Image (cartoon, helix red, strand yellow):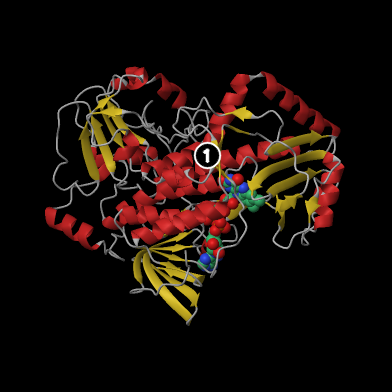
Amino acid sequence: MSRAARPASSGRYDVAVVGGGPVGMWLAAELHRGGVRPVVLERHAKRPAHSKALTIYPRTMEQFAMRGIADRWLAEGTPVPSTHFAILRNRLDMSFLDTRYPYTLFLPQRRTEELLEEHLAELGVPYLTEHAVTGLRQDETGVDLDVDSPSGPTSFRAAYVTGCDGARSVIRAAAGIDFAGTPDTWRTIMGDVELASPPQAPALTLNQPGGSLYMVALGGGQYRLATIDHATMYSLSDGPVTFGELRASALRIAETDFGMRETAGAWLSRVGNATRQAACYRAGRVLLAGDAAHVHYPAGGQGLNLGLQDATNLAWKLAAEIRGWASRGLLDTYHAERHAVGLDVIDSSLAQCGLFANASREGIALRDQFNAILGTDPALCRELATRLSGLAIRYPAPDQIAGQRVPDLDLRGAPAATIFGLLHPAKFLLLTQGTLMDAPAGYRDRLDIVTAELTADRPEWASVRSLLIRPDGYLAWAADTDDAPPLTAWLGSALSHMQQESTTASGQHACAAPATRSASPACPDPVISSAPNHMTKASSTATAAAATAGRRAHGTPLPRRQAPAGQAVTPTSPIDAQIMCPHG
Ligand SMILES: Cc1cc2nc3c(=O)[nH]c(=O)nc-3n(C[C@H](O)[C@H](O)[C@H](O)COP(=O)(O)OP(=O)(O)OC[C@H]3O[C@@H](n4cnc5c(N)ncnc54)[C@H](O)[C@@H]3O)c2cc1C
């Protein structure tokens, strides 16, 4: 697909998405579905030929499935029913996972980016190449961006700006958001190279006293060869990697260079362990997603997945804010929900680095013992695989069932065969096994109501009468009675018929957003407090799964933060209960 710059239509948009990498593109697509007008500003004319990421995990595939486009990835990717932890030889089986995608899908990031760009073009979202953002100023109604464009310096104004501009984010710096963490203390090397004598298997992992080596087939005779070479990684070299360096490293660890060929197209690179996270994912009208919000060593292949899931979480909330129906505090739940998930992924990466990058005798013993335990402890393997898959993520909620991911359950009597088929428009979904009802007037632009039976093969969901599912596929509310769902709490006040029509028809609300939450340049520290329980007695019977899922992102209980001393916290809605912003 051509990436020729398309001209800006008016220069006024609801959201300027800065950075046309995978996260920016997915966010723009989701914003468009939410009924607002995004524009993507990308500094480069062409995307890089190489791919950083190779792996797509189950929860990301589920996101694509919720929008009806998963088949595009399935048509090209290679499903591998396992993953690894800390580059250890004993792999983690994924086939037991409760999803339609129980595997790691191998697909080079470049193809994911091309598929996303094609998708954006289908939606008609403007993607402007050679538009490098250099600065910003925000006021009460919007943000002005300084942009270097092919026709010279120009400016864009939008109601909100999202920084999806990678690890060295200009947007993050311009918004004054701290990127707290640690710099590189070691660097490993890798290459996407041709091999004359590759191993038989499409993937190989070696753990030796001198380090580890990882290799995976990329197709077309190409292999990714990465070494964690204890002999050289601490030298912090930052010059270009040479074939000689990669060959010597492979020889040290594997005693062979697998017939590495020195071809012109090979991508050789250093990868460091710098680990940082934005202190705040929001500063007023500026929000961050993807690598702009978090960086870590790519252990376990999680960064791209994390960023794409940030985007899905953010888009519907930002669209709701711009369209004027967001409940008070909804947009701040983006930081509250995703910062914690980002921290879990960072901890996972650091833990893996602790196992493979410790060159001491103790470190090697720890790595080898942990590897041996993985080989004999299926429960540990399942737990680690579940964490990496993204399927265990759940968000803070006042009860046992809300906040968890809704699986793609089979339906009987619905316009789609499964729940994900009903989430294509990215609206709230009220799925009820009770009496058929129509969406109340004023909510139709943001809520679908479907009466259907959940098929009986999932007993843990059998007693649920109604589910209110968020546009990102997480559960807002559930009941085992015919109680009315808390629509106002989640969906705001119903818009008048006329307001709705003007909203959905034109989608033009640039800078018309109510200046609800005042800009809070310091990161609002989320305070999670007890809240009214919006789950009726269904929660006791609804799911055993919920009990397991009723934990923080990856299996550990959610921390419950207390209000700072002297600060009154009075939740007035589920969202207020979930996050109360002291700066709000
Ligand atoms: C070696 C390696 C292997 C990896 N493997 C995996 C893996 O297997 N699985 C996984 O999930 N993750 C992996 N990752 C991480 C993954 O590649 C990143 O998390 C992902 O690229 C982040 O996407 P992004 O869109 O946030 O940022 P980026 O991909 O960095 O995209 C940012 C975009 O913003 C643009 N931009 C920057 N500044 C400006 C500006 N001022 N104005 C306009 N545009 C701008 C850039 O040109 C770029 O297009 C790996 C990373 C590395 C280094």
Amino acid type at circle 1 is Tyr
Give the residue pinned by disc 1: 57
Mark 1 closeness class: few <14, some 14–19, many ≥20 residues within 10 Å? many
* Residue 535 versus residue 474 in the image, above or below: above
How many marks can you see?
A: 1
Query: Residue 303, image x and y in percent?
Result: 57, 47
Q: Ligand 1 is found in which quarter of the picture?
A: bottom right
Q: Is residue 441 visible?
A: yes
* Residue 108 versus residue 546 in the image, above or below: below
Residue drawn at 51 percent across, 49 percent down? 307
Mark 1 lies within 8 Å of ligand 1 (Cβ measured):
yes
Residue drawn at 52 percent across, 45 percent down? 306
Query: Residue 332, image x and y in percent?
Result: 40, 48
Give the farthest residue toward the bottom: 152
Residue drawn at 37 percent across, 38 percent down? 473
Residue drawn at 69 percent across, 22 percent down? 375
In this rendering, position of residue 195 left or right of residue 473? right
Disc 1 is placed on an element classified as: loop
Query: Residue 213, image x and y in percent?
Result: 76, 41
Of 107 and 245, nearer the camera is: 107
In this rendering, position of residue 349 left or right of residue 528? right
Of 515 and 209, nearer the camera is: 209
Query: Residue 538, image x and y in percent?
Result: 29, 21
